[in-house]
Image (spheres, rainbow, N blue to C red):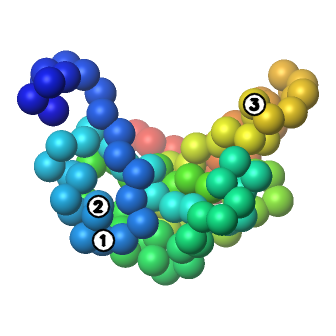
Amino acid sequence: RRRAGPDFIIGATTKTVQQAQAAHRRANYLGVGAVFPSPTKPGAQRLTPEELGVICASVSIPAVAIGGIGPSNLAQLKGPAQRARRVSSLFGQRISKAAAQALARQARQVLFPHPIP
């Protein structure tokens, strides 16, 4: 943070409450996971939905669920995660604009089921 300055957006990857709370002091957002098996990190330690929820609730900055998230498992994040980030299903293969838009709609329905006033 000292090197980057206050306007630089910094993210940190965490797997535990302790890591999240330590990163909270220097980061603007957290990547929390892996929550599902991922082709980008095949040996990553997985978190349960309960662990994900506890980690997300332990900090006041945005926490983003990461790791193997796609259309078939996105609904499992309802409740524990504030946000989810997609990498391999969007960038690791050819995907149509319509498929990307459908995934975005599904994410909004799962993560934000009630309209924001």
> Pointers 1 and 2 in contact (CB under 8 A)?
yes
Label 3 crowd (10 A; few <14 / some 14-19 / many >=20): few
From this view, report whether residue 79 is shown above or below residue 115. Answer: below
Q: N-terminal of the two: label 1 or label 3? A: 1
Secondary structure category for the residue under label 3: helix
Q: CA distance from mark 1 to mark 3?
A: 29 Å
Amino acid type at image mark 1? Val
Q: Quadrant of the C terminus?
A: top left
Where does the image place residue 35, in percent across and percent down from the top left?
60, 65
Identity of the residue drawn at 90% across and 28% down: 94
Which residue is identified by label 1? 17
Which residue is identified by label 2? 20
Q: Residue furthest front?
A: 43
Residue 82 in sight in this render: no
Q: CA distance from mark 3 to mark 2?
A: 27 Å
Left-right relation of 46 to 90: left
Identity of the residue drawn at 52% across and 68% down: 79
Amino acid type at image mark 3? Phe
> Pointers 3 and 2 in contact (CB under 8 A)?
no
Label 1 crowd (10 A; few <14 / some 14-19 / many >=20): some
Location of residue 51 by image quarter: bottom left
Amino acid type at image mark 2? Ala
Identity of the residue drawn at 35% across and 46% down: 12
Label 2 crowd (10 A; few <14 / some 14-19 / many >=20): many
Secondary structure category for the residue under label 1: helix
Left-right relation of 27 to 92: left
Which dot marks residue 91?
3
Left-right relation of 15 to 43: left
